[in-house]
Image: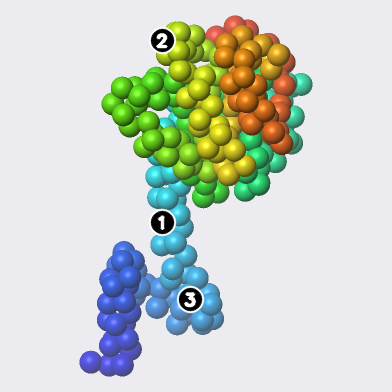
């Protein structure tokens, strides 16, 4: 056995030990290419592990997206920026898409009428966060209240609170569209407050709502809890107030081209 063959087999053994799924024929192709093109050591190393690293990164991204449990597959590239051109500052949204606000543990609040695109934008930002390596969890306010209320019955509230405190970004969508769940759970305001208090200045929370701040006292009828909730969620937060036409009411119908 030649020295080169011996080294080749040892390298394949190293790949197996490290759990790198590298096929022998792929290594042979790259070795031949390196010899023909006189690749530098760094070029060879990059081509050797780059494809595997990229594949692993893509699998990690897809895993984080699945674990986030988004309601829909939304992207910034798929958003119709021309329908409400003044509703969103595209440059600001793309800056948020870098995930820097998550790194700074800053909250994000989108306040605006129904149908203007808040849910699309907030889920698209969540997907970008997954791409950047952040762990994200998406919930509607109704689902969040129902889950926490159920945990009171089966005595798993501490476990559920830890779960919602853990993600780098917790997205709470449709805040205000949960009247049935709130009426069924007198403790809903306190339960929501517990999550916000746990995450306060430790992790980022993004909230999309059609409830203006001055009406939060009506939405969360327990006055002191409503004020404490509001204080913590808006403290240092990025707040986007969105006004425009409802895409669902005035957007293109099925079969029509978008504006």
Residue 105 percent across, percent down from the top left: 62, 43
Residue 253 percent across, percent down from the top left: 55, 9
Tell me whether the residue at label 2 lies in contact with that at label 1, contact meaning CB atoms closer than 8 angstroms. no
Q: CA distance from mark 2 to mark 1?
A: 44 Å
Element marked by disc 3: helix
Q: Earlier in the sequence, mark 3 or mark 1?
A: 3
Looking at the image, residue 43 lies above or below residue 2: above
Element marked by disc 2: helix
Q: Label 3 belongs to which residue? A: 44
- Specify whether 100 is left or right of 191: right
- Specify whether 48 is left or right of 170: left
Q: Residue at the spot x=50%, y=32% of the render?
A: 195
Question: Crowding at label 3, few (<14), some or many (≥20) Cα neighbours within 10 Å?
Answer: some
Element marked by disc 1: helix
Q: Nearer the viewer, mark 2 or mark 1?
A: 2
Quarter of the image for residue 224 reads top right
Q: Label 2 belongs to which residue? A: 184
Residue 164 percent across, percent down from the top left: 45, 36
Q: Residue at the spot x=35%, y=24% of the render?
A: 152
Count all numbered tags in the image, as a single digit. 3
Q: Label 1 belongs to which residue? A: 56
Q: CA distance from mark 3 to mark 1?
A: 19 Å
Q: Residue at the spot x=53%, y=37% of the render?
A: 198
């Amino acid at each position: 056995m030649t020295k080169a063959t011996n080294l080749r087999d040892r390298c394949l053994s190293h790949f197996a030990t490290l759990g790198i799924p590298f096929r022998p024929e792929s290594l042979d192709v790259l070795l031949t290419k390196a010899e023909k093109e006189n690749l530098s050591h760094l070029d060879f190393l990059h081509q050797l592990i780059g494809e595997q690293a990229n594949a692993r990164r893509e699998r990690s991204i897809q895993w984080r997206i699945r674990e986030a449990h988004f309601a829909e597959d939304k992207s910034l590239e798929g958003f119709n920026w021309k329908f409400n051109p003044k509703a969103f500052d595209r440059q600001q949204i793309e800056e948020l898409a870098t995930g820097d606000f998550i790194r700074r543990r800053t909250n994000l609040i989108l306040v605006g009428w129904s149908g203007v695109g808040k849910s699309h934008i907030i889920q698209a930002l969540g997907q970008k966060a997954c791409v950047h390596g952040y762990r994200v969890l998406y919930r509607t306010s109704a689902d969040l209240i129902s889950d926490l209320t159920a945990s009171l019955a089966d005595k798993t509230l501490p476990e559920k609170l830890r779960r919602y405190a853990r993600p780098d970004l917790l997205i709470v969508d449709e805040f205000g569209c949960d009247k049935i769940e709130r009426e069924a759970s007198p403790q809903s305001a306190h339960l929501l407050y517990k999550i916000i208090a746990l995450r306060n200045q430790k992790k980022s929370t993004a909230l999309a709502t059609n409830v203006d701040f001055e009406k939060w006292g009506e939405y969360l009828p327990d006055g002191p809890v409503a004020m404490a909730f509001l204080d913590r969620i808006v403290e240092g937060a990025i707040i986007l107030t969105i006004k425009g036409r409802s895409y669902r009411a005035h957007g293109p119908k099925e079969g029509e081209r978008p504006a």
